[in-house]
Amino acid sequence: MADFIFNFPKDALIYLLAILILLVFYYLKQEVQRLTKTLDRLSNLLDKYEANLQQLDIRLTRVETKIDILKSRVDMGES
């Protein structure tokens, strides 16, 4: 087996190595594309959650304002 590998033509080994490198780069390209799509989906979800959080913050501010108004009315009524 070792004799076969060492007696194999050098050009053929170089071509096999080049093909192997191309296959590795192709695989890496596919993985990068897959990860990019996943990252885009996660980014879109994050944008949606951020928008929902802003809406909840606005609602909370309104509720806090109403509570402050009611507290001031109660304080005026006690005076």
Image (cartoon, helix red, strand yellow):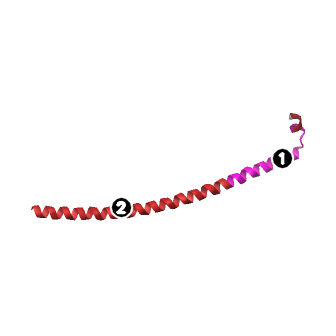
Report the magenta stretch's main SS: helix
Q: Is residue 48 found left or right of 61 in the rendered image?
A: right
Q: Position of residue 14 (x, y in %)?
A: 84, 47
Residue contact between numbered discs 1 and 2, judged by CB atoms under 8 Å:
no
Residue corresponding to mark 1: 14
In which quadrant will I find the C terminus? bottom left
Q: Is residue 4 found left or right of 49 in the rendered image?
A: right
Q: Position of residue 71 (x, y in %)?
A: 19, 61
Along the line of sight, which residue is nearer the eye, 7 or 37?
37
Three-letter amino acid code at disc 2? Asp
In magenta, the rendered stretch is 5-29
- Tell me the distance, in whole angstroms, between the alpha carbons under discs 1 and 2: 63 Å
Q: Position of residue 68 (x, y in %)?
A: 22, 62
Three-letter amino acid code at disc 1? Ile
Residue corresponding to mark 2: 57
Which residue shows up at 16% across the image and 65% down it?
A: 73
Q: Is residue 64 found left or right of 9 in the rendered image?
A: left
Between marks 1 and 2 in the image, the one whose residue lies nearer the viewer: 2
Which residue shows up at 48% across the image and 62% down it?
A: 47
In which quadrant will I find the N terminus? top right
- Among numbered discs 1 and 2, the one appearing first in the sequence: 1
Q: Which numbered dot is residue 22?
A: none
